Image (tube, coloured by chain):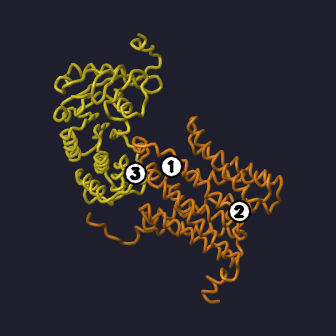
Chain colours: A orange, B yellow
Amino acid sequence: MTLSDFLVSPFVEFEFMRRALVGVVALAVGAGPVGVLLMLRRMSLMGDAMAHAILPGAAIGYLLFGLSLMAMASGGLIAGLAVALLAGGVARATEMKEDASLAAMFLLSLALGVAIVSLRGNNIDLLHFLFGSVLALDNEALMLIATVATLSLVTLALIWRPLVLESVDPGFLRSVSRAGGPAHIIFLGLVALNLVGGFQALGTLLAVGIMIVPAVISRFWSRDLTAMIVIAAVAGILSGYIGLLLSFQSGLAAGPAIILVAGLLYCGSVLFGRCGGLLRPLLPRRPLEA
Amino acid sequence: MASLLQFRDLTLGYDRHPAIHHLSGVVEAGSLTAVVGPNGAGKSTLFKGIVGLLRPHGGMIEYGGIAPVDIAYLPQAAEIDRSFPIHVYDLVAMGLWRRIGAFGCIGKLERGKIDGAIAAVGLTGFELRQIAALSGGQMQRALFARLLLQDSRLIVLDEPFNAIDDKTVADLTDLIRRWHREGRTVLAALHDFDLVRRHFPQTLLLAREPVAWGETGRVLTVEHLMKARRMSGAFDEREAECSVAAE
Protein backbone atom coordinates (compact mmCIF):
# COMPACT_ATOMS: atom_id res chain seq x y z
CA MET A 1 0.00 0.00 0.00
CA THR A 2 1.45 3.35 -0.96
CA LEU A 3 1.46 6.30 1.40
CA SER A 4 -1.29 8.03 -0.53
CA ASP A 5 -3.40 4.89 -0.36
CA PHE A 6 -3.01 4.96 3.37
CA LEU A 7 -3.53 8.69 3.94
CA VAL A 8 -5.92 9.78 1.24
CA SER A 9 -7.81 6.96 -0.43
CA PRO A 10 -10.26 6.22 2.39
CA PHE A 11 -11.58 9.73 1.87
CA VAL A 12 -11.54 9.47 -1.89
CA GLU A 13 -13.37 6.17 -2.00
CA PHE A 14 -15.98 6.55 0.71
CA GLU A 15 -18.51 9.33 0.94
CA PHE A 16 -19.18 8.78 4.62
CA MET A 17 -15.50 9.39 5.32
CA ARG A 18 -15.58 12.63 3.37
CA ARG A 19 -18.64 13.79 5.26
CA ALA A 20 -17.07 12.86 8.56
CA LEU A 21 -13.92 14.80 7.67
CA VAL A 22 -15.85 17.90 6.64
CA GLY A 23 -17.89 17.72 9.82
CA VAL A 24 -14.87 17.38 12.07
CA VAL A 25 -12.93 20.12 10.31
CA ALA A 26 -15.85 22.52 10.69
CA LEU A 27 -16.24 21.56 14.34
CA ALA A 28 -12.53 22.07 15.04
CA VAL A 29 -12.50 25.49 13.39
CA GLY A 30 -15.47 26.68 15.45
CA ALA A 31 -14.70 24.98 18.75
CA GLY A 32 -10.95 25.65 18.82
CA PRO A 33 -11.06 29.42 19.39
CA VAL A 34 -14.00 29.11 21.78
CA GLY A 35 -12.10 26.44 23.69
CA VAL A 36 -9.03 28.63 24.10
CA LEU A 37 -11.07 31.37 25.72
CA LEU A 38 -12.97 28.82 27.80
CA MET A 39 -9.68 27.50 29.14
CA LEU A 40 -8.20 30.95 29.78
CA ARG A 41 -11.32 32.03 31.63
CA ARG A 42 -10.96 28.92 33.81
CA MET A 43 -14.33 27.63 32.64
CA SER A 44 -13.24 24.19 31.44
CA LEU A 45 -15.31 22.41 34.09
CA MET A 46 -18.26 24.62 33.15
CA GLY A 47 -17.85 23.49 29.54
CA ASP A 48 -17.84 19.86 30.60
CA ALA A 49 -20.94 20.36 32.72
CA MET A 50 -22.74 22.08 29.85
CA ALA A 51 -21.82 19.22 27.52
CA HIS A 52 -23.32 16.69 29.85
CA ALA A 53 -26.37 18.87 30.41
CA ILE A 54 -27.12 18.74 26.72
CA LEU A 55 -27.98 15.05 27.05
CA PRO A 56 -31.25 15.36 28.99
CA GLY A 57 -32.27 18.28 26.78
CA ALA A 58 -31.63 16.34 23.61
CA ALA A 59 -33.18 13.25 25.19
CA ILE A 60 -36.42 15.11 25.90
CA GLY A 61 -36.43 16.32 22.31
CA TYR A 62 -35.92 12.72 21.21
CA LEU A 63 -38.68 11.51 23.52
CA LEU A 64 -41.15 14.01 22.14
CA PHE A 65 -40.18 14.18 18.49
CA GLY A 66 -38.05 11.13 17.74
CA LEU A 67 -34.70 11.49 15.99
CA SER A 68 -35.45 15.01 14.82
CA LEU A 69 -32.29 17.08 14.69
CA MET A 70 -34.11 20.32 15.29
CA ALA A 71 -35.87 19.01 18.37
CA MET A 72 -32.78 17.47 19.87
CA ALA A 73 -30.56 20.44 19.07
CA SER A 74 -33.02 22.93 20.56
CA GLY A 75 -33.57 20.79 23.63
CA GLY A 76 -29.84 20.40 24.06
CA LEU A 77 -29.16 24.11 23.64
CA ILE A 78 -31.76 25.10 26.20
CA ALA A 79 -30.52 22.53 28.71
CA GLY A 80 -26.87 23.51 28.24
CA LEU A 81 -27.54 27.20 28.75
CA ALA A 82 -29.84 26.52 31.68
CA VAL A 83 -27.13 24.58 33.51
CA ALA A 84 -24.55 27.31 32.87
CA LEU A 85 -26.80 30.04 34.22
CA LEU A 86 -28.09 27.91 37.10
CA ALA A 87 -24.62 26.90 38.27
CA GLY A 88 -23.52 30.52 38.17
CA GLY A 89 -26.64 31.59 39.98
CA VAL A 90 -26.33 28.97 42.70
CA ALA A 91 -22.68 29.89 43.21
CA ARG A 92 -23.58 33.55 43.62
CA ALA A 93 -26.58 32.97 45.84
CA THR A 94 -25.05 30.42 48.20
CA GLU A 95 -21.68 29.94 49.81
CA MET A 96 -20.90 27.02 47.52
CA LYS A 97 -18.11 27.52 45.00
CA GLU A 98 -19.03 27.09 41.36
CA ASP A 99 -17.05 23.91 40.76
CA ALA A 100 -19.01 21.92 43.32
CA SER A 101 -22.37 22.98 41.89
CA LEU A 102 -21.14 22.16 38.39
CA ALA A 103 -19.98 18.70 39.40
CA ALA A 104 -23.32 17.97 41.02
CA MET A 105 -25.21 19.27 37.99
CA PHE A 106 -23.33 17.34 35.43
CA LEU A 107 -23.74 14.07 37.22
CA LEU A 108 -27.43 14.79 37.59
CA SER A 109 -27.74 15.65 33.91
CA LEU A 110 -25.93 12.54 32.77
CA ALA A 111 -28.08 10.24 34.90
CA LEU A 112 -31.27 12.03 33.86
CA GLY A 113 -30.34 11.94 30.20
CA VAL A 114 -29.51 8.25 30.15
CA ALA A 115 -32.73 7.47 32.02
CA ILE A 116 -34.85 9.45 29.54
CA VAL A 117 -33.23 7.91 26.48
CA SER A 118 -33.72 4.40 27.81
CA LEU A 119 -37.42 5.18 28.23
CA ARG A 120 -37.92 5.16 24.49
CA GLY A 121 -34.71 4.14 22.76
CA ASN A 122 -32.57 1.06 22.64
CA ASN A 123 -28.88 0.52 23.34
CA ILE A 124 -27.77 1.69 19.88
CA ASP A 125 -29.55 5.00 20.31
CA LEU A 126 -27.98 5.41 23.73
CA LEU A 127 -24.53 4.73 22.31
CA HIS A 128 -25.06 7.37 19.68
CA PHE A 129 -26.12 9.89 22.29
CA LEU A 130 -23.13 9.13 24.44
CA PHE A 131 -20.43 8.74 21.81
CA GLY A 132 -21.83 10.38 18.71
CA SER A 133 -22.12 9.11 15.19
CA VAL A 134 -19.51 10.98 13.23
CA LEU A 135 -19.62 8.39 10.46
CA ALA A 136 -23.34 8.88 9.97
CA LEU A 137 -23.60 12.62 9.51
CA ASP A 138 -26.44 13.40 7.15
CA ASN A 139 -26.93 16.71 5.31
CA GLU A 140 -28.97 18.19 8.12
CA ALA A 141 -26.26 17.42 10.67
CA LEU A 142 -23.53 18.85 8.44
CA MET A 143 -25.57 22.01 7.90
CA LEU A 144 -25.95 22.38 11.66
CA ILE A 145 -22.24 21.94 12.26
CA ALA A 146 -21.29 24.33 9.46
CA THR A 147 -23.78 26.95 10.68
CA VAL A 148 -22.47 26.69 14.22
CA ALA A 149 -18.87 27.06 13.07
CA THR A 150 -19.63 30.13 10.93
CA LEU A 151 -21.74 31.74 13.63
CA SER A 152 -19.02 31.06 16.20
CA LEU A 153 -16.28 32.73 14.21
CA VAL A 154 -18.35 35.77 13.30
CA THR A 155 -19.73 36.27 16.80
CA LEU A 156 -16.34 35.77 18.40
CA ALA A 157 -14.89 38.42 16.11
CA LEU A 158 -17.63 40.82 17.15
CA ILE A 159 -17.34 40.33 20.90
CA TRP A 160 -13.56 39.81 20.86
CA ARG A 161 -12.44 43.01 22.53
CA PRO A 162 -14.90 43.08 25.46
CA LEU A 163 -14.49 39.33 25.97
CA VAL A 164 -10.69 39.46 26.16
CA LEU A 165 -10.78 42.52 28.40
CA GLU A 166 -13.31 40.86 30.66
CA SER A 167 -11.07 37.82 30.89
CA VAL A 168 -7.93 39.77 31.78
CA ASP A 169 -9.21 42.57 34.01
CA PRO A 170 -12.94 42.41 34.71
CA GLY A 171 -12.67 45.17 37.31
CA PHE A 172 -11.30 47.63 34.78
CA LEU A 173 -13.95 46.81 32.20
CA ARG A 174 -16.65 47.21 34.81
CA SER A 175 -15.29 50.64 35.69
CA VAL A 176 -15.45 51.95 32.13
CA SER A 177 -18.23 50.01 30.45
CA ARG A 178 -21.20 47.71 30.84
CA ALA A 179 -20.18 45.45 27.95
CA GLY A 180 -18.65 42.77 30.17
CA GLY A 181 -21.89 41.12 31.25
CA PRO A 182 -23.37 40.75 27.76
CA ALA A 183 -20.06 39.53 26.38
CA HIS A 184 -19.99 36.77 28.98
CA ILE A 185 -23.56 35.67 28.26
CA ILE A 186 -22.99 35.67 24.50
CA PHE A 187 -19.83 33.65 25.02
CA LEU A 188 -21.78 31.06 27.06
CA GLY A 189 -24.21 30.88 24.18
CA LEU A 190 -21.34 30.17 21.78
CA VAL A 191 -20.04 27.41 24.04
CA ALA A 192 -23.48 25.83 24.19
CA LEU A 193 -23.86 26.12 20.42
CA ASN A 194 -20.52 24.47 19.73
CA LEU A 195 -21.33 21.70 22.17
CA VAL A 196 -24.63 21.02 20.45
CA GLY A 197 -22.76 20.83 17.16
CA GLY A 198 -20.16 18.52 18.69
CA PHE A 199 -22.86 16.39 20.26
CA GLN A 200 -23.87 15.16 16.80
CA ALA A 201 -20.46 13.91 15.90
CA LEU A 202 -18.88 13.02 19.20
CA GLY A 203 -21.69 12.49 21.67
CA THR A 204 -22.22 13.99 25.06
CA LEU A 205 -19.21 12.44 26.72
CA LEU A 206 -16.64 13.62 24.21
CA ALA A 207 -18.10 16.76 22.61
CA VAL A 208 -16.21 19.03 24.94
CA GLY A 209 -13.01 17.18 24.00
CA ILE A 210 -12.74 18.89 20.62
CA MET A 211 -13.01 22.19 22.47
CA ILE A 212 -10.75 21.72 25.47
CA VAL A 213 -7.97 19.41 24.35
CA PRO A 214 -6.85 21.50 21.33
CA ALA A 215 -6.99 24.58 23.57
CA VAL A 216 -4.73 23.00 26.15
CA ILE A 217 -2.38 21.86 23.38
CA SER A 218 -2.10 25.44 22.13
CA ARG A 219 -1.00 26.61 25.58
CA PHE A 220 2.19 24.59 25.21
CA TRP A 221 3.17 26.12 21.90
CA SER A 222 2.48 29.82 22.15
CA ARG A 223 1.98 32.73 24.51
CA ASP A 224 0.21 34.87 21.97
CA LEU A 225 -3.58 34.72 21.98
CA THR A 226 -4.02 34.91 18.22
CA ALA A 227 -1.43 32.20 17.62
CA MET A 228 -3.11 30.07 20.25
CA ILE A 229 -6.49 30.06 18.57
CA VAL A 230 -4.92 29.14 15.25
CA ILE A 231 -2.93 26.33 16.83
CA ALA A 232 -6.05 25.06 18.60
CA ALA A 233 -8.01 24.93 15.36
CA VAL A 234 -5.14 23.19 13.56
CA ALA A 235 -4.74 20.68 16.41
CA GLY A 236 -8.46 19.94 16.21
CA ILE A 237 -8.32 19.42 12.45
CA LEU A 238 -5.28 17.18 12.76
CA SER A 239 -6.93 15.12 15.49
CA GLY A 240 -9.99 14.74 13.33
CA TYR A 241 -8.09 13.66 10.27
CA ILE A 242 -5.74 11.25 12.00
CA GLY A 243 -8.54 9.95 14.23
CA LEU A 244 -10.75 9.14 11.27
CA LEU A 245 -7.87 7.38 9.51
CA LEU A 246 -7.08 5.42 12.66
CA SER A 247 -10.68 4.38 13.00
CA PHE A 248 -10.87 3.37 9.32
CA GLN A 249 -7.67 1.30 9.39
CA SER A 250 -8.15 -0.32 12.78
CA GLY A 251 -11.89 -0.51 13.38
CA LEU A 252 -11.84 1.63 16.52
CA ALA A 253 -14.96 3.72 17.12
CA ALA A 254 -14.46 6.98 15.25
CA GLY A 255 -15.48 9.55 17.87
CA PRO A 256 -13.28 8.17 20.63
CA ALA A 257 -10.45 7.66 18.12
CA ILE A 258 -10.49 11.38 17.32
CA ILE A 259 -10.32 12.38 20.96
CA LEU A 260 -7.66 9.72 21.57
CA VAL A 261 -5.46 11.29 18.91
CA ALA A 262 -6.08 14.72 20.43
CA GLY A 263 -5.02 13.25 23.75
CA LEU A 264 -1.82 11.89 22.26
CA LEU A 265 -1.04 15.27 20.72
CA TYR A 266 -1.63 16.72 24.18
CA CYS A 267 0.83 14.30 25.78
CA GLY A 268 3.38 15.17 23.11
CA SER A 269 2.83 18.87 23.84
CA VAL A 270 3.23 18.40 27.57
CA LEU A 271 6.59 16.76 26.90
CA PHE A 272 7.95 18.75 23.98
CA GLY A 273 5.94 21.96 23.80
CA ARG A 274 7.85 25.19 23.24
CA CYS A 275 6.24 26.91 26.22
CA GLY A 276 6.57 24.89 29.36
CA GLY A 277 7.11 21.45 27.88
CA LEU A 278 8.57 19.15 30.52
CA LEU A 279 11.48 17.88 28.46
CA ARG A 280 12.41 21.24 26.94
CA PRO A 281 14.87 22.19 29.70
CA LEU A 282 16.88 19.11 28.73
CA LEU A 283 17.68 20.72 25.38
CA PRO A 284 20.68 22.97 26.03
CA ARG A 285 19.80 26.63 25.36
CA ARG A 286 21.77 29.42 26.92
CA PRO A 287 19.75 32.23 28.51
CA LEU A 288 19.57 35.55 26.64
CA GLU A 289 21.32 38.75 27.63
CA ALA A 290 18.15 40.50 28.70
CA MET B 1 -11.79 76.75 42.49
CA ALA B 2 -14.85 74.75 41.47
CA SER B 3 -15.64 71.68 43.50
CA LEU B 4 -15.27 68.44 41.59
CA LEU B 5 -16.63 66.20 44.31
CA GLN B 6 -18.78 67.09 47.24
CA PHE B 7 -19.51 64.65 50.04
CA ARG B 8 -22.64 65.34 52.04
CA ASP B 9 -22.84 63.44 55.32
CA LEU B 10 -21.59 60.34 53.50
CA THR B 11 -21.88 56.94 55.17
CA LEU B 12 -20.52 53.98 53.22
CA GLY B 13 -19.79 50.40 54.08
CA TYR B 14 -20.51 46.71 53.69
CA ASP B 15 -23.38 44.83 55.30
CA ARG B 16 -24.59 47.62 57.60
CA HIS B 17 -21.13 48.11 59.11
CA PRO B 18 -20.13 51.61 58.09
CA ALA B 19 -16.52 51.86 56.99
CA ILE B 20 -17.01 55.61 56.50
CA HIS B 21 -19.07 57.63 58.96
CA HIS B 22 -20.68 60.92 58.08
CA LEU B 23 -18.04 62.37 55.87
CA SER B 24 -18.69 65.86 54.56
CA GLY B 25 -16.38 68.00 52.53
CA VAL B 26 -15.26 69.11 49.13
CA VAL B 27 -12.58 67.94 46.72
CA GLU B 28 -11.57 70.99 44.68
CA ALA B 29 -10.91 70.61 40.98
CA GLY B 30 -7.21 70.52 40.31
CA SER B 31 -6.27 69.55 43.85
CA LEU B 32 -3.72 66.93 44.75
CA THR B 33 -4.95 65.15 47.88
CA ALA B 34 -3.48 62.28 49.82
CA VAL B 35 -5.90 60.11 51.78
CA VAL B 36 -4.18 58.61 54.81
CA GLY B 37 -5.23 56.61 57.81
CA PRO B 38 -4.72 53.30 59.56
CA ASN B 39 -5.70 50.03 57.89
CA GLY B 40 -9.45 49.58 58.00
CA ALA B 41 -9.90 53.36 58.09
CA GLY B 42 -12.17 53.33 55.08
CA LYS B 43 -9.86 54.63 52.35
CA SER B 44 -10.61 51.88 49.83
CA THR B 45 -14.28 52.05 50.73
CA LEU B 46 -14.37 55.77 50.05
CA PHE B 47 -12.72 55.30 46.67
CA LYS B 48 -15.13 52.54 45.71
CA GLY B 49 -17.98 54.87 46.63
CA ILE B 50 -16.52 57.64 44.50
CA VAL B 51 -16.18 55.49 41.38
CA GLY B 52 -19.64 54.03 41.84
CA LEU B 53 -18.79 50.48 42.94
CA LEU B 54 -20.54 50.97 46.29
CA ARG B 55 -23.81 52.66 47.01
CA PRO B 56 -23.94 54.92 50.11
CA HIS B 57 -25.89 53.81 53.14
CA GLY B 58 -26.59 57.40 53.89
CA GLY B 59 -25.71 60.82 52.58
CA MET B 60 -24.51 61.38 49.04
CA ILE B 61 -21.69 62.21 46.69
CA GLU B 62 -22.22 65.10 44.28
CA TYR B 63 -20.23 65.18 41.07
CA GLY B 64 -19.42 68.57 39.59
CA GLY B 65 -19.25 67.90 35.89
CA ILE B 66 -17.75 64.43 35.83
CA ALA B 67 -19.50 61.04 35.68
CA PRO B 68 -18.21 58.08 37.71
CA VAL B 69 -17.56 56.16 34.49
CA ASP B 70 -15.09 58.86 33.38
CA ILE B 71 -12.96 58.55 36.50
CA ALA B 72 -9.60 56.83 36.08
CA TYR B 73 -9.41 54.37 38.96
CA LEU B 74 -6.52 52.19 40.09
CA PRO B 75 -7.77 49.68 42.69
CA GLN B 76 -5.55 48.40 45.46
CA ALA B 77 -5.25 44.82 44.28
CA ALA B 78 -6.13 44.73 40.63
CA GLU B 79 -8.16 41.67 39.67
CA ILE B 80 -5.84 41.14 36.77
CA ASP B 81 -5.27 37.58 35.57
CA ARG B 82 -1.49 37.68 35.33
CA SER B 83 -1.31 34.39 33.48
CA PHE B 84 -3.47 35.60 30.57
CA PRO B 85 -1.54 35.75 27.30
CA ILE B 86 -1.60 39.48 26.63
CA HIS B 87 1.22 41.94 25.97
CA VAL B 88 1.99 45.13 27.83
CA TYR B 89 0.96 47.06 24.70
CA ASP B 90 -2.56 45.64 24.69
CA LEU B 91 -2.96 46.03 28.44
CA VAL B 92 -2.03 49.67 28.20
CA ALA B 93 -4.21 50.16 25.11
CA MET B 94 -7.26 49.24 27.23
CA GLY B 95 -7.08 52.76 28.57
CA LEU B 96 -8.53 53.97 25.28
CA TRP B 97 -11.79 52.11 25.82
CA ARG B 98 -13.91 55.20 26.49
CA ARG B 99 -12.76 56.62 23.18
CA ILE B 100 -12.83 53.55 20.93
CA GLY B 101 -15.15 51.08 22.65
CA ALA B 102 -15.59 47.54 21.38
CA PHE B 103 -15.19 48.28 17.67
CA GLY B 104 -13.23 51.48 17.30
CA CYS B 105 -10.11 51.41 15.20
CA ILE B 106 -6.70 51.85 16.76
CA GLY B 107 -5.16 54.04 14.10
CA LYS B 108 -1.96 56.01 13.84
CA LEU B 109 -3.15 58.65 16.32
CA GLU B 110 -4.04 56.07 18.92
CA ARG B 111 -0.80 54.16 18.41
CA GLY B 112 1.12 57.36 18.97
CA LYS B 113 -0.71 57.91 22.25
CA ILE B 114 -0.06 54.37 23.40
CA ASP B 115 3.64 54.63 22.56
CA GLY B 116 3.75 57.94 24.38
CA ALA B 117 2.12 56.53 27.49
CA ILE B 118 4.49 53.56 27.55
CA ALA B 119 7.45 55.90 27.19
CA ALA B 120 6.14 58.19 29.94
CA VAL B 121 6.25 55.36 32.48
CA GLY B 122 9.66 54.13 31.35
CA LEU B 123 8.51 50.91 29.75
CA THR B 124 9.79 51.50 26.22
CA GLY B 125 11.00 48.19 24.87
CA PHE B 126 8.53 46.24 26.96
CA GLU B 127 5.64 46.58 24.51
CA LEU B 128 5.59 42.94 23.43
CA ARG B 129 6.42 41.44 26.78
CA GLN B 130 3.79 39.17 28.32
CA ILE B 131 2.27 40.57 31.52
CA ALA B 132 3.12 37.31 33.28
CA ALA B 133 6.79 38.21 32.88
CA LEU B 134 6.51 41.63 34.57
CA SER B 135 7.80 42.43 38.02
CA GLY B 136 5.57 44.22 40.54
CA GLY B 137 7.06 47.59 39.69
CA GLN B 138 6.82 47.04 35.95
CA MET B 139 3.19 45.99 36.25
CA GLN B 140 2.41 49.12 38.23
CA ARG B 141 4.07 51.23 35.56
CA ALA B 142 1.95 49.54 32.90
CA LEU B 143 -1.19 50.27 34.89
CA PHE B 144 -0.17 53.92 35.23
CA ALA B 145 0.33 54.05 31.47
CA ARG B 146 -3.22 52.76 31.09
CA LEU B 147 -4.42 55.51 33.44
CA LEU B 148 -2.56 58.05 31.35
CA LEU B 149 -4.45 56.96 28.26
CA GLN B 150 -7.76 57.32 30.02
CA ASP B 151 -7.02 61.06 29.94
CA SER B 152 -9.36 61.66 32.83
CA ARG B 153 -9.95 64.84 34.86
CA LEU B 154 -10.10 62.84 38.09
CA ILE B 155 -7.63 60.11 38.96
CA VAL B 156 -8.18 57.94 42.00
CA LEU B 157 -5.27 55.76 43.18
CA ASP B 158 -5.74 53.22 45.95
CA GLU B 159 -2.36 52.50 47.61
CA PRO B 160 -0.48 52.61 44.30
CA PHE B 161 2.94 52.20 45.89
CA ASN B 162 2.48 49.15 48.12
CA ALA B 163 5.48 46.85 47.83
CA ILE B 164 6.93 48.81 44.90
CA ASP B 165 10.62 49.59 44.46
CA ASP B 166 11.94 53.12 45.13
CA LYS B 167 12.82 53.96 41.56
CA THR B 168 9.33 53.10 40.36
CA VAL B 169 7.78 55.07 43.21
CA ALA B 170 9.89 58.09 42.29
CA ASP B 171 9.07 57.85 38.58
CA LEU B 172 5.36 57.39 39.15
CA THR B 173 5.27 60.21 41.68
CA ASP B 174 6.70 62.44 38.97
CA LEU B 175 3.81 61.34 36.78
CA ILE B 176 1.34 62.31 39.51
CA ARG B 177 2.96 65.72 39.77
CA ARG B 178 2.69 66.11 36.02
CA TRP B 179 -1.06 65.37 36.24
CA HIS B 180 -1.33 68.04 38.93
CA ARG B 181 0.45 70.53 36.69
CA GLU B 182 -1.97 69.68 33.87
CA GLY B 183 -4.83 70.70 36.13
CA ARG B 184 -6.16 67.22 36.78
CA THR B 185 -7.54 66.26 40.20
CA VAL B 186 -5.75 63.44 41.95
CA LEU B 187 -6.75 61.45 45.04
CA ALA B 188 -4.27 58.91 46.33
CA ALA B 189 -4.43 56.62 49.36
CA LEU B 190 -0.94 56.37 50.77
CA HIS B 191 0.93 55.03 53.76
CA ASP B 192 4.23 56.83 53.30
CA PHE B 193 3.90 60.10 55.27
CA ASP B 194 7.24 61.29 54.03
CA LEU B 195 6.04 61.07 50.44
CA VAL B 196 2.81 62.78 51.39
CA ARG B 197 4.58 65.68 53.11
CA ARG B 198 6.92 66.18 50.18
CA HIS B 199 4.48 66.03 47.28
CA PHE B 200 0.87 66.35 48.38
CA PRO B 201 -0.44 69.82 49.26
CA GLN B 202 -3.72 68.50 50.69
CA THR B 203 -4.40 65.57 52.98
CA LEU B 204 -7.50 63.89 54.31
CA LEU B 205 -6.83 61.91 57.49
CA LEU B 206 -9.46 59.24 57.79
CA ALA B 207 -10.26 56.79 60.58
CA ARG B 208 -13.79 55.88 59.61
CA GLU B 209 -14.74 59.40 60.50
CA PRO B 210 -12.80 62.30 59.05
CA VAL B 211 -10.16 63.33 61.59
CA ALA B 212 -8.76 66.24 59.65
CA TRP B 213 -8.87 67.55 56.10
CA GLY B 214 -6.89 70.39 54.68
CA GLU B 215 -3.37 71.55 54.13
CA THR B 216 -0.97 68.65 54.75
CA GLY B 217 1.22 70.43 57.32
CA ARG B 218 -1.78 71.13 59.50
CA VAL B 219 -3.35 67.68 59.12
CA LEU B 220 -0.38 65.39 59.75
CA THR B 221 0.26 66.36 63.37
CA VAL B 222 1.04 63.97 66.19
CA GLU B 223 -2.21 64.87 67.89
CA HIS B 224 -4.30 64.04 64.83
CA LEU B 225 -2.43 60.82 64.14
CA MET B 226 -2.92 59.59 67.69
CA LYS B 227 -6.59 60.38 67.48
CA ALA B 228 -6.86 58.43 64.22
CA ARG B 229 -5.20 55.40 65.72
CA ARG B 230 -7.60 55.41 68.63
CA MET B 231 -10.65 55.69 66.43
CA SER B 232 -10.12 52.73 64.17
CA GLY B 233 -10.85 49.24 65.37
CA ALA B 234 -12.66 46.07 64.36
CA PHE B 235 -16.30 45.88 63.31
CA ASP B 236 -18.46 45.25 66.35
CA GLU B 237 -21.53 43.08 65.76
CA ARG B 238 -22.97 44.16 69.10
CA GLU B 239 -22.57 47.84 68.30
CA ALA B 240 -25.65 50.00 68.85
CA GLU B 241 -27.27 51.66 65.86
CA CYS B 242 -25.61 54.87 64.85
CA SER B 243 -26.81 57.72 67.09
CA VAL B 244 -25.97 60.45 64.62
CA ALA B 245 -27.98 58.76 61.87
CA ALA B 246 -30.97 58.53 64.21
CA GLU B 247 -31.16 62.30 64.56
Q: Is residue B33 above or below residue B115?
A: above
Looking at the rendering, which quadrant does residue A89 occupy?
A: top right
Q: Is residue A33 above or below residue B207?
A: below
Give the numbered dot on residue A131: 2
Q: Is residue B87 left or right of residue B123?
A: right
Q: Residue at x 43, y 11 (%)?
A: B246
Q: Are marks 1 and 2 on the same chain?
A: yes
Q: Position of residue B145 (x, y in %)?
A: 28, 49
Q: Nearer the viewer, residue B206 or A149?
A: A149
How packed mark 1 is, by other alpha carbons closer than 10 Å (few <14, some 14-19, many 20 or more), is many
Q: Are marks 2 and 3 in contact (CB under 8 Å)?
A: no
Farthest residue, direction bottom: A2
Q: Residue at x 65, y 89 (%)?
A: A1
Q: Is residue A55 left or right of residue A264?
A: right
Between the residue at mark 1 and the residue at mark 3, the CA separation in whole angstroms equals: 21 Å
Q: Amino acid at mark 1?
A: Ala
How packed mark 3 is, by other alpha carbons closer than 10 Å (few <14, some 14-19, many 20 or more), is some
Give the numbered dot on residue A183: 1
Between the residue at mark 1 and the residue at mark 2, the CA separation in whole angstroms equals: 31 Å
Q: Amino acid at mark 2?
A: Phe
Q: Is residue B136 visible?
A: no
Between the residue at mark 2 and the residue at mark 3, the CA separation in whole angstroms equals: 37 Å
Give the numbered dot on residue B82: 3
**What kind of element bears circle 2?**
helix
Farthest residue, direction top: B247
Q: Is residue B107 above or below residue A1?
A: above
